[in-house]
Amino acid sequence: MREPGFGTRCVHHGDDHGSHFGAPSPPIYQTATFVATDAALLGRREHASPPGYDYTRVDNPTTHAFESHVAALEGAEAARSFASGMGAIAAVVLHACGAGDHVVCVDTVYGPTRAFLKDYAARFGVDTTFVDGRDPADFAKATRAETRLYFLESPSTRVFHLQELAAVAQIARDRGILTAIDNSWASPYFQNPHEHGIDLVIHSATKYIGGHSDVLAGVVTGDARRIRRLQLQEGVLLGGVLDPFAAWLLLRGLRTLAVRMERHQSSALHLARALERHPRVHRVLHPGLPSHPQHALGQRQMRGYGGLFSVVLEDTEREQALTVANALRYFGVAFSWGGYESLCVPVEFPEYGGRWGLRLHVGLEDPEDLLADLEDALRA
Ligand SMILES: *Cc1c(COP(=O)(O)O)cnc(C)c1O
């Protein structure tokens, strides 16, 4: 039989029509605990037959269904969910490192990830070196005897730098170092880093996996042994676990992931190409444009492109970037991205002569409406 494609797996993974009276959407197990029918089973139901649950901080049927779905889409053995993307990122760093250990991280990483490594983890004796990372040798050069973790984010989400995943994974493997990547931008639909040898894949599920700007969540995929440790240590002991209702919303989001990503991709590329020709635009930073310096690498290791990119404006100061942002009708000025609606944030680009511009998330609206909106705002 034909192996089901990605879209089919989004829709049908975990189908269990024999249970729940045939409801295609599974119930939400909104419960903190699970009563045992026999005291001897308490705390051991995971190993019982059929397996059961004890306490939602450890595991819950609804969060488990979400985790199993994401693991399948990333091609991983297992997944563990957290209450937010940062919960997942912090868990991975604490899983990999203890006092005296060292991390190599890309310098364009998500701001709070950088702050966690630089300021917070440092308090517990974990030191981090930030590297450019566009050359895999940057990782080898920064490695010390105490290096335990390479932290990647490819593409990054302001200037959209890429790392060569297979090459960095090989450097890490040769030295016994763990690799983790923030894969939120591409989503599992466009990039599966485990295929390139990366050990742990992290998503801010708040973004594309949820897709509706109505839930905060994070998830990590990897081999069953590591994910089990993330569950029993960083999950159970730190307690930043996913709520069953949030997991149910995420399951709903996953069913439409493939179609949403296609639309985000095509609309964002349409806008990026048009903006690249606009006289007020200095540069468009989008890995899908041939003008992106790492376009060829992106084509090799991704199957497509997310809907988030940046526009560096010509001769623009902060005030003018704010004026453009405020003139937009359909792009809400807000942090976050990955939902159905278009959003933007004004951004400074020190690497482009201190120019200002906008980071745009292209939502599911009609692309021609979004383009007209941007053209009008750029006239403002
Ligand atoms: C939003 C975001 C995060 C953090 O996710 P939360 O769910 O907000 O904690 C991590 N990485 C990237 C690239 C993000 O955009």
Image (tube, grey):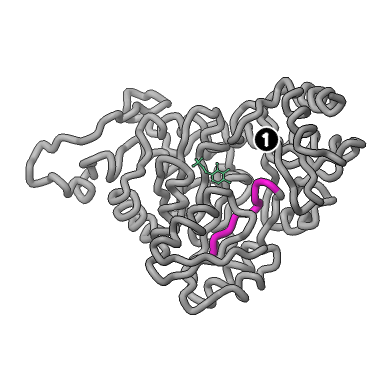
Whole-percent x, y for residue 136 in the image: 66, 69
- Residue 361 as seen in the image, left or right of residue 21: right
Q: Quadrant of residue 359?
A: top right
Task: Decide if ligand 1 comes within 8 Å of the CB at mark 1.
Answer: no
SS of the residue at dot 1?
A: strand
In this picture, residue 167 sits left or right of residue 103: right
Q: Which residue is mark 1?
A: 345
Residue at left 80%, top 32%?
320
Residue 263 in view of the camera: no
Q: Is residue 195 above or below residue 305?
A: below
Q: Which quadrant does the N terminus fall into?
A: top right
Residue 154, how many percent across, how many down? 63, 54
153 inside magenta stretch = yes
Q: Residue furthest bottom?
A: 145
Q: Nearer the viewer, residue 291 or 54?
A: 291
The spot of residue 233 in percent (x, y) is 31, 55
Which region is colored magenta? 150-158
Q: Quadrant of the C terminus?
A: top right
The local crowd at label 1, few if under 14, some if 14 to 19, many if 20 or more residues have their Cα within 10 Å, is many
Q: In this rendering, is residue 102 above or below 64?
A: below
Residue 10: x and y in percent read 53, 37
- Amino acid found under the numbered disc labelled 1: Val
* Residue at the image position 56 percent from the left and 32 percent from the top: 211
User: For the point 57% across and 56% down, which residue is it?
Assistant: 193
Residue 111 makes an appearance in the image: yes
Camera-side residue: 81 or 17?
A: 81
Nearer the observer, 111 or 366? 111
| Residue in view at x 29 percent, y 49 percent | 236
User: Magenta stretch containing residue 124, yes or no?
Assistant: no
Identify the image quadrant of residue 227: bottom left
